[in-house]
Amino acid sequence: MALELTAFTVAKLASTPGLGLTTAHGGAGVERAAGVPIAVERKGPFPRLHGGEMVLTSGLHIGEDWTAWKNFLSEATGAGASGLIIGLGADAAFERLPAQVLALASENDLPLLTGDIADFGRIAHTIAVLHAEGQREALRRPLDLQMEITAIVARGGSFGDLLSGWQQRTEEPVAVFDRLGRVMARSSAFPSILLAPLSERLAGREAPRLGEQLLLSATELVADPDGTSAGVEETVEVFPFAGNDTVRGFCVRIPTGQETAELAAPALRSLLALEFERVWFLDESARRKRAERFARLLTFTEPGSARTFLRSIGIDSGPLRGVSIEARNETHAEVLIDDLAVVLAAPFIRHRHRIVECLATVDPRQALADYGLDVPTGIGTRGAPEHSARSIRQATLALETSRRAGTPIEYVDGASHEFLINAAPSEYLEAFSSAVLAPIENSRGGEALLNTLHTWLLERRSVEATAERMGVHRHTVRNRMQRIVQITGHDLDGIDAQTELWLALKVRGFRDSVGTSPKGP
């Protein structure tokens, strides 16, 4: 990054005592930063510059070739030279500056200084010294700025104090949003018209991740129907700040392009992260209280006691749903308990190491999808407050499956077989179903035997109800069931055998409808 060398410009170089420099042409470029000196005394292509150098020449390699002078000045301007110093005297091309060269400098608007060719060594040395001093000054200013804004935080200043101090010293409007896109603070000059569209952008999946920077134009954020930007012309810079490896919030600046501010901006983001952590720890007592209430609610099993407890803490006694989440690390878990309290409208939430548990008052599936959570998640069934402990247990079971499946898993109440089928790998289910049902399926009349077995299980092992439902004689049902016993070697009175056959039929596609044939694997 180029340093801001406002302490050493071409104009200040020309007025430095003892150098004997005279300004032949100034123009708009005299306030440019004067860079390191470079002497050019050869014909051919102009040497490549890094930008901002002061070019010194005696002109001996050009002489009175005005076309060559035109190319020389044009190439110097194009290469990014901050100015040109031509030496005059008996040992130079000219003793006085020709009008043609002055006209060419004016045409290119390149600052042109003249001096005695005999003093060129001293002039170049002085430029190098002044340039080094300018670099030190340019480095000192962002350090001073960092120390000043750090002092604001050290004195106990708030987010607002820090942002106001930044704006006062840099003239840059700045605002802070939390990771959910909510405005936490802003400086006085930050346009209020930008707050709502920025909140919407940062609350969605377009928000930048750690290490990313997002540049937005005001036109993108607050365009009127005619395409204008509602009087706001600035470019907006959005940069996340972190706690460990987790986004804590977003620093939004309207940059002015000052190098001092650019160099100090990382310090601003670091201070915002520290201040966020301080505020978070101040709220630790509230988190502990929520966790204590969570644990207490799980102890209630009677409707009256659960509702009485909820009313005593000012919470509606509506249905709740358990959610169990495995965070990436403990820091992520700490972030989640704050975020999910808002996202899931969860008055009861806690974390134990990496596991975050909460009782949500809204449907967690869509809310978590919108939030963009990409870690193992288990969801229990929705129920009355006195059933909260059961919903949390269900969410914990679903979390175990979610770890392996790589997707959020929802526990299905009253249909454990469906839950297991959805959670298990398809290859395993296919092998299990084939191993259990293949002996029946491959025997004579296998399809009729499977239909009879499924109906018999549906009808709670009643031969009469099975016969009536299938439209066959009860002796037919008895004969088929006896054959199944002979083929499988199972005692169908045992619960283990019934459960195994029931799960295998469900995997094969049999459903609890009137028609008993499977609709597909």
Image (spheres, grey):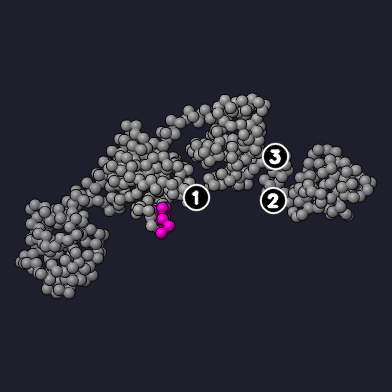
Q: If the image is split into quadrants, where does the C terminus sit?
A: bottom right
Name the residue carrying label 2: 426
Ranked by sequence position, the earlier of labels 3 and 2 is 3
- Disc nearest the viewer among 3 and 2: 3
Ranked by sequence position, the earlier of labels 2 and 1 is 1
Residue 208 falls within the magenta-colored stretch: no
Q: CA distance from mark 1 to mark 3?
A: 32 Å
Q: In the image, which disc is placed on residue 23?
A: none
Ranked by sequence position, the earlier of labels 1 and 3 is 1
Q: Is residue 310 above or below residue 172?
A: above
Name the residue carrying label 1: 205
Indicate the amino acid at tag 3.
Asp
The location of residue 48, given as percent across then percent down, is 25, 64
Name the residue carrying label 3: 413
The location of residue 392, given as percent across then percent down, is 63, 35
Labels 2 and 1 touching (C-beta < 8 A): no
Circle 2 Cα neighbour tier, 10 Å, few/some/many (<14 / 14–19 / ≥20): few
